Amino acid sequence: DTGVSQNPRHKITKRGQNVTFRCDPISEHNRLYWYRQTLGQGPEFLTYFQNEAQLEKSRLLSDRFSAERPKGSFSTLEIQRTEQGDSAMYLCASSLAGGGLDEQFFGPGTRLTVL
Amino acid sequence: AQRVTQPEKLLSVFKGAPVELKCNYSYSGSPELFWYVQYSRQRLQLLLRHISRESIKGFTADLNKGETSFHLKKPFAQEEDSAMYYCALSGAGQNFVFGPGTRLSVLP
């Protein structure tokens, strides 16, 4: 296990198309997070799973965004009807909950460009 | 609402000089504060958190609730400290809020 992996690393799509990203967390980690990062900004929290349950979702998250973690392992983030404003780096992180001191380990990110 | 501000986008210091990266936050409850670092071509990684009260790579950060600050300090900067630094806050739940980041450049 070499850490959190994300696929694809880069995605270019046309406005209006749907895209799906995948995140594979560190195997024993039960928490998984999705963030979005635009140029010059820090990561912006999108949603969080504990095992297969989606426990928190940002109020900023449009209805076009949906995330799943069906078996409590890998997760997918889908963006429907993409817009140019969705262009960003999408980061996934995972952690092992316990003792309140769980550290998030980040993946390399998926860079989305919407033309 | 949770908010994190980092007033400096870029901070340049000479090797061996002290460095302080500023972070201020707003949160009505008891926050947990973190510093994350991203070195060139590497992933974002945790540097330190206030609850651990530890020193990592010579860096320390003290939570000042009165000033709502969590500044990151190092007495003698090294060239390998050059990176992007993000301050982050976690309040209730697992909703993490990151600041915009400060790029530290340590000059030889």
Image: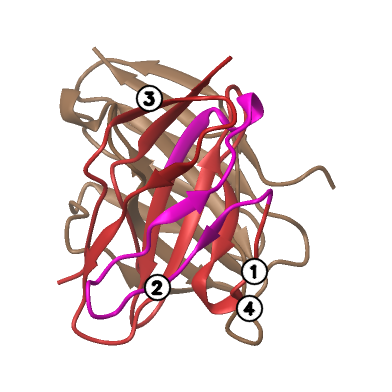
Query: x and y percent of residue B16 in the render?
Result: 59, 31
Circles 4 and 1 on the same chain: no
Quadrant of the snapshot with the N terminus of chain B: bottom left
Q: Which residue is mark 2?
A: B63
Mark 1 vs mark 3, CA separation in Å? 37 Å
Q: Position of residue A83 (x, y in %)?
A: 17, 28
* Amino acid type at mark 4: Ala
Mark 3 neighbour class, 10 Å CA radius: few under 14, some 14 to 19, many 20 or more: many
The three-letter code of the residue at mark 2 reads Leu
Instruction: Of the two numbered discs 2 and 1 on the same chain, state the one appearing first in sequence.
Output: 1
Q: Regarding mark 4 in the picture, which secondary structure is present there?
A: loop
Label 3 resides on the chain identified as A
Q: Which residues are magenta?
A: B57-85
Residue designated by label 4 = A97
Count of numbered circles on the image: 4
Tell which of B98 and A59 is nearer to you: B98
- Name the residue tied to disc 3: A112
Q: Position of residue B64 (x, y in %)?
A: 33, 75
Image chain in brown: A
Q: Chain of mark 1?
A: B
Mark 3 or 2, which is nearer the eye?
2
Q: CA distance from mark 3 to mark 2?
A: 36 Å
The residue that disc 1 covers is B54
Mark 4 vs mark 2, CA separation in Å: 23 Å
